[in-house]
Amino acid sequence: MEVHLVDGTFELFRYFYAVPAHDAGGREVGATRAVLRSLVGMLEGGATHVGVATDHVIESFRNDLWPGYKTGAGIDPALRSQFGLLEDTLAAAGFTVWPMVDVEADDALAAAAAVADADPAVGRVYVCSPDKDLAQCVRGDRVVQLDRRGAGRLRAEPDVEDAYGVPPALIPDWLALMGDSADGFPGLPGFGAKSAAAVVRHFGGLDGVADDPQRWSGASVRGAARLAATFAARRDEALLYRTLARLRTDVPVGAVDEWRWRGPRDAGRAACHAIDAEDVPGRLEALRAARA
């Protein structure tokens, strides 16, 4: 079997800015309707085990660790109002949904990827998000990252290293040095994507980085002495950023068999009707009949 793990928050944001607004009963539903149709299309393409992680709220435990971490401030109210609607609609359509509060959707995806990777019945795991922090979940060509936009792009472990300069396991260390503007932490001054990758790769991660500039020579980075001094002075800050970037894998997500799509729930037709997705109930019933 194959497992598809979907970043529902990313999909909601993506479609909110990609499809026309649609009012249903005085409520904006355009992005939710588009995500639903997209995931039904995934089922029609052969997907059987699908888990969707969502940020029920944007804030998480990371906001307590770093005051500048991303928040829900500035989100368009028409988008924010669809967070719960998306969760309820997808659940009614029969999808497994993990709404996250204390942790983030990315943590749930990382936990589910680890659960699926450990299941010998699983042939391949698709982490459906292009976000670079989720690249840390990739394992060989068994757990891969899939960008569903356009024709879709697959990244196995060699592709992650080609793209970012470090293997999946060192993605948090790399992000700690270069920063992640999407999540709101800056990294250390002077480090860019290439220099951060060179240093992390040379030392095998932040724990092995030496304070002695002489030991940086093999990293082949411009301004090694300056960067070494910066790291030595701000090591604790870098380790904090790595904590922010490192995804949790202890989130309760259940077992793989629980993620099998078995058909819409009793509320499925009403949920589709509420967002003017009148084409979807018939598609879901046809899928259920075909898989009976």
Image (tube, grey):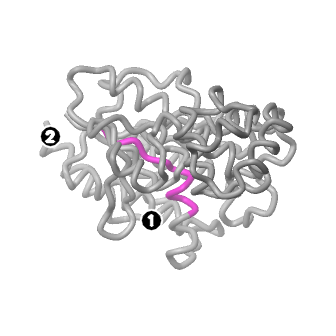
- Give the amino acid at mark 1: Ala
User: In which quadrant of the rendered view does residue 199 lie?
Assistant: top right
Q: Nearer the viewer, residue 135 or 105?
A: 135
Secondary structure beneath label 2 = helix
- Residue positioned 35% across, 70% down in the render: 150
In the rendered structure, the answer to whether residue 18 lies left or right of residue 62 reads left
| Label of residue 212 in the image | none
- Residue positioned 81% across, 45% down in the render: 230
From which residue to which does the magenta span run? 3-13
Image coords of residue 135 (percent x, y):
46, 44
Q: Nearer the viewer, residue 71 or 167?
A: 167
Mark 2 — residue?
291
Image coords of residue 29 (percent x, y):
56, 65
- Residue positioned 69% across, 66% down in the render: 78
Looking at this view, name the residue that lies furthest to the bottom.
Answer: 20
- Give the amino acid at mark 2: Arg
Tell whether position 5 is magenta: yes
- Residue positioned 52% across, 40% down in the render: 201
In the rendered structure, the answer to whether residue 241 lies left or right of residue 48 reads right
| Label of residue 34 in the image | 1
In the rendered structure, the answer to whether residue 75 lies left or right of residue 251 reads right
Q: Quadrant of the N terminus?
A: top left
Tell whether position 62 is magenta: no
Q: Nearer the viewer, residue 188 or 73?
A: 188
In the rendered structure, the answer to whether residue 8 lies left or right of residue 162 reads right
Q: Is residue 261 in view?
A: no
Give whichever of discs 1 and 2 has the lower sequence position. 1
Cα gap from disc 1 to disc 2, whole angstroms: 24 Å
